[in-house]
Amino acid sequence: MIILHIAEKVHWLNQQSQPFYRDPSLESLGFLHCAQIKDVVDAANCYYRGKPDRVLLCIDTAKTVPEIKWEMSEYGVQYPHVCGALNRDAIVEVLDFPIDPEGGFVLPEKLRHSSQ
């Protein structure tokens, strides 16, 4: 299964040579926020609207070393949380996360067939 993590592009680029990806949320909350493909646009527009230069880390859950916990949000949506630094080989692809003219995020074309 593929889950997605929304990362700041500059933060992702600064960690290119590291064996594990560490998001700031790992230090503050103890996990990396992730979403299923079908939920990522709503989550992005809720929390990151107006904050461009984001990328989607496509994570293969079968390759992920840290535990993944599924937790219910206050909106009734289950989100996966990666509970530790993410091993790079679990990141199978990195995609730019486009925005529309109004500033809302749009699911990348490559993921649209998988969002159903």
Image (cartoon, rainbow, N blue to C red):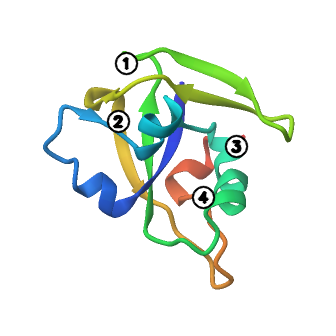
Q: Amino acid at mark 2?
A: Val
Give coordinates of residue 78: x percent, y percent.
74, 30
User: Pointer 2: what residue?
Assistant: 92
In this rendering, position of residue 54 left or right of residue 101:
left
Pointers 1 and 2 in contact (C-beta within 8 Å): yes
Residue found at the far bottom of this picture: 101
Mark 3 lies on residue: 38
Considering only order in the chain, which callout, 1 or 3, is on the residue closer to the N terminus? Answer: 3
Residue 63 place in picture, x, y as percent:
37, 18
Mark 1 or mark 4: whose residue is earlier in sequence? 1
Q: Is residue 76 left or right of residue 70?
A: right
- Circle 2 packing at 10 Å, graded few (<14), some (14-19), many (20+), is few
The type of residue carrying mark 4 is: Leu
Q: Is residue 80 above or below residue 36?
A: above
Q: Is residue 18 left or right of residue 107?
A: left
In the rendered structure, the answer to whether residue 111 lies left or right of residue 64 reads right
Residue highlighted by disc 4? 107
